Image: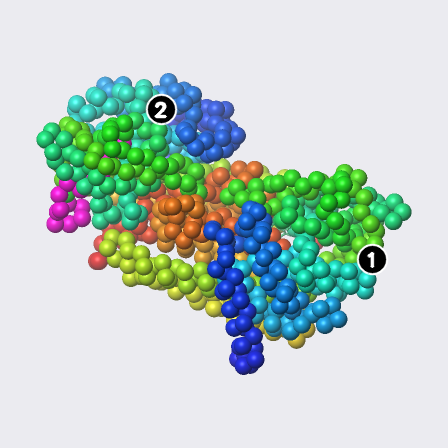
Amino acid sequence: MDFKLTDEQVARRNEFFEVCGELEKKKPANFSGIESIYDSDEGWQYHLNCAKEFAKRGWIALGWPSEYGGQGSVMDRVFFAEARGYYDTPGVDIFGVAMLAPTLLGAGSEEMKREFLPKIAAAEIMFCELWSEPNAGSDLAALTTTALRDGDEYVLNGQKTWSTGAHRSDWAFALVRTDPHAETKHRGLTFLMFDMKTPGITVKPILYMDRGHLYNEVFFDDARVPVKYVVGEENKGWGVTQLLAGFERSSLDAIMMMRRQLEGLVEYCNETKVGGELLAKNPIIRNRIAELACQVEAARALAYRVADQQAKNEMGAIDASAVKVFAGDLSARLARLGADILGPYGQVRSSKWAPLEGFYEKQYQQYFILTVSMGTNEIQRNIIAWYGLGLPRMR
Amino acid sequence: MDIAFTEEQEMLRTMVSDFLVKECPKSIVRELEEDEEKGYSPQIWKAMADLGWLGLIIPEEYGGMGMTFQELTIILEQMGANILPGPYFSTVVKGAMPILDAGSEEQKREFLPRIASGELIFTMALLEADGTYDASGIATKAAPQGDSFVINGTKLFVEMAHVADYLICVARTKDGASPEDGLTLFIVDVRSPGIHCEVIPTMGMDKLCEVRFENVAVPKKDVLGELDKGWPIIEQVIEKGGVAKAAESIGGMQTCLDMTVTYAKERVQYDRPIGAFQALQHIMADMWIATQTSKYLVYMVAWMESEGIPCAKEAAIAKAYVNEAYKWLTDRTVQLHGGIGTSRDHDVGLYYRRAKTADIAFGATDFHRELVADRMGLLR
Ligand SMILES: Cc1cc2nc3c(=O)[nH]c(=O)nc-3n(C[C@H](O)[C@H](O)[C@H](O)COP(=O)(O)OP(=O)(O)OC[C@H]3O[C@@H](n4cnc5c(N)ncnc54)[C@H](O)[C@@H]3O)c2cc1C
């Protein structure tokens, strides 16, 4: 067992931290978390600027095979995620880079890899993920949006929902039903990419509970898209989506973001007096911050193990689920702690009255992004119970 | 012992609930949240005055209905269940109640009938920059000048001050031996020269204001209670206000539990209602436990308050317990609704945000746990 990084790794890691630290200085006011990427033009521009900066350095394609512009190792990708998490730096398209690229690498045709991977690596194209539907969330295979073949095209009809960033992205990757008569609901699904400017596609905003514009509804009315952008085979899209489970992220970005938040809280408590006494001296606050610091370190330790497994190409899906659940819940606890420490200021929206730019008022509402999206915490626990512990699966 | 509402109380409860369900649908709640100017509905306000709710706890001789704190918590529970925005809470709990408890006969005659009739909106200006409910947080000063006191300072998180007619301002009139010593309450006309008010944007969108006092002259006759000895009145406000807030919260808890169970029965995933998953059943069972324990705790303390039984410790227990229970329960409510629970269009977020606001009002959990520890006899 050895948690030590090589000198080379340390240097590489530092480089990621330095660049993200520099980019942080250009952050728009009140920018925090994923909602900020999609909510305002300013936030989106910052995301694009960071993306260009990373693309220039070849960092978007870390760990990819070199024939598609890849460089560096899987571990580099992990360190890069840590740095971005720590500084809450956008610039890596969650959908295009973290989800689609590995899917293309695993299941895309040579032609599609050559067409899309370089554009993704160059940050020239941004994606959204059109999977969920009003009646197909956790049970994704229940989806009903149809794509019926008509020559070289599919004709799309139906509705997607919770589509993060669909109002900003250039392209989408979707899961659609190409064979409505298939024997089981998992068959007859196809993983398909298309241009969001296709006529017949309408994007309508849904506001998040804090009134931010993060996700959308997407409607298809006879939208015609080329057949050639199927990933994998027609009617075999379910298997393609399952590939992603093997590419699980380590959650180290979220964990490093929490580490930074703890540092921020320490700083705040060291500067802020209530009743003439520094908050830092309040034993309850000390205890609660220390409690969460322990949990963040525990999360980090397991996340490194997940990352190491990924680097060695061993499937770490169970521990990845464990880290995701733990990190999601931890981020909720941290948001609550931050809001508590701020006292009445914990409820203040970004304004001249808000300490820390209103961060905890937002975070108090936004932590559900971690506990609900990309497989709810309940679904992740099922995965741990069924596949990790081998417990009987309820039918 | 008879742990049940009386027939009259049940009637009140049903009447309030029917009224609010009809008059205050969530579309109105959302509209009032977004309304920067008022944040309350004058029509609903007038209707509530006509029904006698504004004077519910005001004795008949001052134009009220002469009911007890228990009946008030019955109304508040339903208001919490339907999250009615507006100055009811600030007017009755932070205005009428301290005047009833500490006002002179003259003050009672001047203000209580006009509160009962819906003519006056009241609030209390207590918190300051420190954000603490401890006496140490009060730095605003009031200095005598002829027949008046002149107030200088800045108050924060003053609920509904932007539409209030009067506010009860807590200020320091003397540097006493302890922070609790030397505080005085003043009934201040909000139109007095030198008062500046701004609405602070908050998670609950509940119109908490910054109120600045610049040389605001208040006639000496408008001192509420005794000069320099205001702290016990504030302690009462925190004690009863905390229980009143908890009463609102238990209403919200019941609504959230109902919404969750209804949704879990309707929402189908994997070919069955999600309520069939044991993982979720246990969470909902815990939500039931949290709701019932919170409710009966609040009912018990409300009864003690009405009977005049000393219950400073129990009141702090109720506030601390319900704070955590409501926050936890609304978090689970959002989680069990999945994606839709996180959206502005769905009602659960309205409750989720308010649970945090309710926690903060009259002191958050740590503040009240400290009071409990104290009142249990733990040495400092
Ligand atoms: C902020 C945010 C961003 C999102 N972005 C996207 C996006 O870009 N693209 C996209 O396609 N989707 C997106 N989603 C949708 C997300 O993937 C779904 O919300 C998620 O899969 C849950 O589905 P649901 O909302 O339909 O909830 P449901 O599946 O209806 O779940 C409701 C509740 O039931 C529980 N539950 C369901 N099944 C089980 C079970 N078998 N055992 C125990 N409990 C169960 C859930 O955990 C949850 O608590 C986003 C969601 C959020 C909140």
Residue shown at 82% from the left, 62% from the top: A111
Residue shown at 52% from the left, 68% from the top: A17
Q: Secondary structure at mark 2?
A: loop
The magenta stretch is: B167-181
Q: Nearer the viewer, residue B95 or A147?
A: A147
Q: Which residue is mark 1?
A: A233
x and y, in percent, of residue B248 in the image = 40, 36
Q: Which residue is mark 2?
A: B53
Confirm whether the magenta stretch covers residue B179: yes
Question: Does residue A207 appear anywhere in the picture?
Answer: yes
A282 left or right of B4 in image? left
x and y, in percent, of residue A190 in the image = 79, 52
Q: Residue furthest left?
A: B146
The rendered magenta stretch, by its main secondary structure, is classed as: loop
Q: Nearer the viewer, residue B281 or B77?
A: B77
Residue shown at 22% from the left, 58% from the top: B380
